[in-house]
Amino acid sequence: MKKPNVFMTRRVAVEIISMLEEVAEVDVWEEESAVPRDVLVEKAKKADALFTMLTEKVDEEVLAHANQLRIVANMAVGYDNIDVAAAKKKGVIVTNTPDVLTEATADLVFALLLATGRRLMEANRFLHNGEWSTWNPYLMAGQRCHGATLGIIGMGRIGEAVAKRAKGFDMPILYHNRRRRTEVEEALDARYADLDELLQQADYVVVLTPLTAETRGLIGERELSLMKETAVFINASRGGTVDEQALYRALVEKRIWAAGLDVFQKEPVPMDHPLLTLPNVVALPHIGSATYETRNRMARLAAENIVAVLTGKEPLTPV
């Protein structure tokens, strides 16, 4: 009996590929770059399963060619790169990798908060460029972190993990979410606030929402105008949640103090992107979950979802 076909859009750990090879013929895209669109469409034609990354857009066009496809396993928590409605209509299961990347992403968010507030990257460049010639009281002075008010937009698993870290810094915590989470309020002494109140009061504003029709462009000119001039803006959700041109203007005009960004509207971000020209922006290449342990756990969970579906079982983490 012929084995089903799995197309993987990146190479992952050997043991995870071996797990898939026990139940399927596995075709791996060996390049570091994203799979070209025409190649993805062609591979989808004979695939029973697609093992995808955020760089692959699995939309109606791809699905229309994928007549034997049974599952798209996305190696990410987010799945805005997949047309879930079109997949459901075609009877294709979509899975993601929640939970396993929560702590690594929360670590990165807090590191980005500290690096941005305390100007660590700017200070590092200052030293390496040979500009450190003397000491003065306000040399590379930044914003305080300990005791500052943290505003979290999107109190999901990652938001909660960030809030736990903030408690160690004695940070009062405000949060805004689709629904109130009284258990988080009680456990972490967090206070629910509407979006405008959070933006007006927070010293650090952290966006951790998924990208949906409701959250696309959530932070724009109006929202940025509500923030303090000393406020630091952190985005570790999706680039599409923020109007990048409005953010650039707010930073240039010193209407907010700094920004830390792990995500952009277009990724990889073009090197001539205006935000990359600003000294008060700490920019990272979407590495929120990038630890070896976490990425291996994500890949394993994606593979386990594929194995489950191809062997007639229920997926572990369906969207």
Image (cartoon, rainbow, N blue to C red):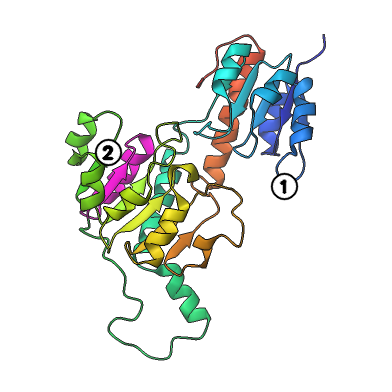
Q: Is residue 77 above or below residue 254?
A: above
Furthest residue to the right? 1
Residue 179 quadrant: top left
Q: Determine whether the residue tagged by mark 1 lies in a helix, strand or loop.
A: loop
Q: Is residue 234 found left or right of 129 in the rendered image?
A: left
Residue receiving disc 2: 176
Along the viewing direction, whichever of 202 and 136 lies nearer the viewer = 202
Q: Is residue 261 visible?
A: no
Q: Residue at x 23, y 30 (%)?
A: 180
Please tell me which residue lies in front, 175 or 249. 249
Q: Residue at x 66, y 32 (%)?
A: 16
User: Is 276 included in the stretch rendered in magenta?
Assistant: no
Q: Is residue 105 left or right of residue 26?
A: left
Does residue 102 appear left or right of residue 90 in this picture?
Answer: left
> Residue shown at 78%/34% (left/top)?
38
Give the percent coordinates (x, y) of residue 239. Answer: 49, 46
Three-letter amino acid code of the residue under disc 2:
His
Q: Nearer the viewer, residue 272 or 72?
A: 272
Q: Which residue was labeled with disc 1?
A: 32
Q: Is residue 88 visible?
A: yes
Q: Looking at the image, which residue sits at the far front?
A: 222
Which mark is first along the chain, 2 or 1? 1
Taking depth in this image into account, of 301 and 163 the one nearest to the observer is 163
In the image, residue 306 lies at what x, y percent? 63, 21
Of badges 1 and 2, the one in the foreground is 2
Q: Quadrant of residue 103?
A: top left
